[in-house]
Amino acid sequence: MFSIRDLNQNVILFVGRPSDLRKGLGLLFEAVEILTTLAELPRFALWVAGGSPREVNAVAQMIKRIRCLRTLHEEGRILLWGRVENLALSELYSRASVTVIPSYREEFGIVAVEAMMSGCPVIAAKTGGLQDIVREESGALFEPDDVLGLAATLCGYLRNPQQRNLHCESARRRAETLFSSHVTLAQITKVYESSFLPDTNHVSWTQQSLPRAQLLTADRLSRLKTVLKDEHISVTPVSFGKHPVFEIASGETRFVAKFFTQRASLQASLLPHSPSFSMERGCSISYNRVLYNKDNPVTPATCYFEETAEPLIVSEWMQQLNTSPIEDLDSLIHLVISRCQRHKILPDCLEVDEYLSALNSFAETRDNLHLASFDRASAQLNARMTGGRLVLCRTHPQVELLRFRQLLNIRSWPIPEEFRVRSTQLIDLLLETEDIIIERPALAHADPKPEHLLTDASGQILLADFEHSRYVVGPLDLSLWFVITGIRGRIDSNASDFCDRLCRLLSSRRERYLCVCWVVAEVIFFTLQRFSVGDREEMQVAQRFMRNMGLALLNKEIIQ
């Protein structure tokens, strides 16, 4: 029997006819078996709803013959519900952490709509109508028949309850907006109207498929009018990222307004998370980081800010920098990053002393206890820019490589063996002959994308969006620039090109080494993060990049 504790465990739900092989129940069983082999994964249960008594009996016989599934069943962690009345299905959806639809073929995907209507996120195969129903802000899609991709997305949900909670609300909103009965009837009526032509430029048509967090709601518009004291402002969306950004015209003056919405931590889906650290991102944490940098000489002037349930910052409008050859942009970003690092240099204080002490201790004894102490010291050091909230801050590249090596060795993630081997070999190559570098952290922007490069009237280069900023050791910003502009998502990305760009910008061997460590750490992190939402393409690119990285570094004498 279940204990009270068991009743509160995560529930993975499958709804469908078990005998219909197109529904992919066998694939889900394989993914569940993989989950049972992973380290540090929260306890979960599997519920299977649907099927006649004969079909349920066949599934039960299968479970008894597979050791892993039999053990889960004996522990009360697999429940076979059989046929469930439609009116009762909503109860199962509402109690589930995630609904899985591993179908090989699906014309529409009514189970996805039903689950989302009940506020349950959906992990679905990228097939048929499921591709139109499920979005990343309310679930995840994986390639059909990709058992590792399915297992990886399940890991992300099981480890990150904050992500589940946010996706629950987004799923319900999306389902109600697109699939509720009154919306469906209205669309059917329009189909039979001879004059019906969808107006794709109309706001209601365009915005109905967007998550609410990105919309110009009446409340946001009212706040902007109040802030600027102008009832006739013109507001244009300029970004559809995690936080909505709008360009505002008030008379002859233009501004940029950013609302900071709540989102889940990407790290919480991948890394062991201490209960003392916040799993939330966005809102006040991002707002305070941007506000901490409002006097930074490389950021546009802040005109207005207020911290509410949805904090708002209004800045002066700046022209986005025109696209240039990557070699020219490398030099520009290097200059603006150097200026950024000189802002708010850390003073002598207790937090810095504790950080350096924790780093020294970890360098001497590289175990989980000292790593946890270092993470706390890093969080306390960076709490000055997060409004006092403690957040897991990855602040030292060698420490991050050691963290990833340990988690790769104990198999914390369901990843291809090729990626695990290449990652661990490259990490060992970088760390084998180098001691951990002990030095004070410096300020980093931590999100230097080409679209964040701005220019003022005098031609000076500025940076927007400091919501990821933190104090770190080594050239994190330059490393992220290399990863974003030359490695992530590029099929032709290669280690030799990266080494050439690195040598052009950095002359110090120490800086080059720290930069390489950050690049490898961030490639691993972003690849795992994208794989946790069903994206295999980035893993393939990363594997190609890492394959020749060691030889390229040695040939260029970047490492010894």
Image (tube, grey):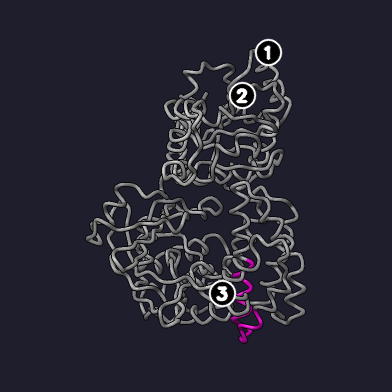
Residue denoted by label 2: 16
The secondary structure type at the circle numbered 2 is loop
Q: Residue at x 59, y 80 (%)?
A: 328
Going by the picture, which residue comes out furthest to the front? 195
Q: Is residue 435 visible?
A: no
Give how far apart the Cα atoms at labels 1 and 2 are.
14 Å
Q: Quadrant of the C terminus?
A: bottom right
Residue denoted by label 1: 54
Magenta segment includes 327: no
Give how far apart the Cα atoms at labels 2 and 3 are.
49 Å
The secondary structure type at the circle numbered 1 is helix
The reply to whether dot 1 and dot 2 touch (C-beta < 8 Å) is: no
Give how far apart the Cα atoms at labels 3 and 1 are.
61 Å
Quarter-of-image position of residue 466: bottom left
Span of residues in magenta: 502-520
Image position, residue 87 (x, y; %): 47, 18
Say left or right for 420 vs 519. Answer: right
Foreground residue among 41 and 173: 173
Q: Residue at x 74, y 62 (%)?
A: 544
The secondary structure type at the circle numbered 3 is helix
